Image: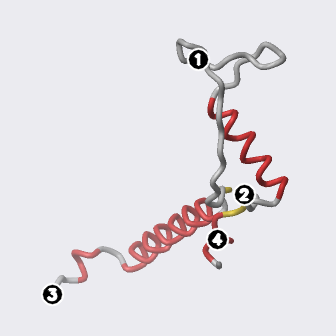
Amino acid sequence: MVSPSRLGDPRRLFFVACAVLALGAVALAWYATRTVRPDCVVGVSTVTGRDGPGLPGANGRIRPDPELIDRAYRQAIASGHCDPPGARWKRWLD
């Protein structure tokens, strides 16, 4: 058995335990309130030139793939095919 003198002052141990518990609660709250996207399948296609890069649109601008995927996701939300993003903790209750 460990002697009480090796563990230190009981008030100090209580303070450390409370501090660790509080930090854990803050970390969990931060993680739980982050916005997440639900699972949703969207299709994206681009027309490319012979060398591989996408062809410019009507405005002369080439859209990168992440922008096209995000646009398709927003359209799927607007049409009701996908759920909108929400807080992570709300997904835990489903």
> Which of the two discs, 2 and 4, labels the residue nearer the N terminus?
2
Q: Closer to us: mark 3 or mark 1?
A: 1
Quadrant in which the N terminus is drawn: bottom left
Tag shown at residue 91: 4
Amino acid type, residue under disc 4 in the picture: Arg
Q: Is residue 18 or residue 62 the one in the foreground? A: 62
Q: Nearer the viewer, residue 92 or 24?
A: 92
Q: Are marks 4 and 1 in contact (CB under 8 Å)?
A: no
What residue does disc 3 label? 1
- How far across and how far down the image is residue 60, in percent? 79, 13
Q: Position of residue 94 (x, y in %)?
A: 65, 78
Mark closer to the observer (2, 3): 2
Residue 90 numbered mark, or none: none
Q: Residues within 10 Å of mark 4 (few under 14, many from 20)?
A: few
User: As shown in the figure, which amino acid type bears the numbered disc 3?
Assistant: Met
Q: How many marks?
A: 4
Q: Could you tell which of marks 2 and 3 lies nearer the N-terminus?
A: 3
Q: Which mark is residue 53?
A: 1
Q: CA distance from mark 3 to mark 1?
A: 70 Å
Badge 2 element: loop
- Dot 4 falls on a residue whose secondary structure is helix
Alpha-carbon span between mark 4 and mark 1? 38 Å
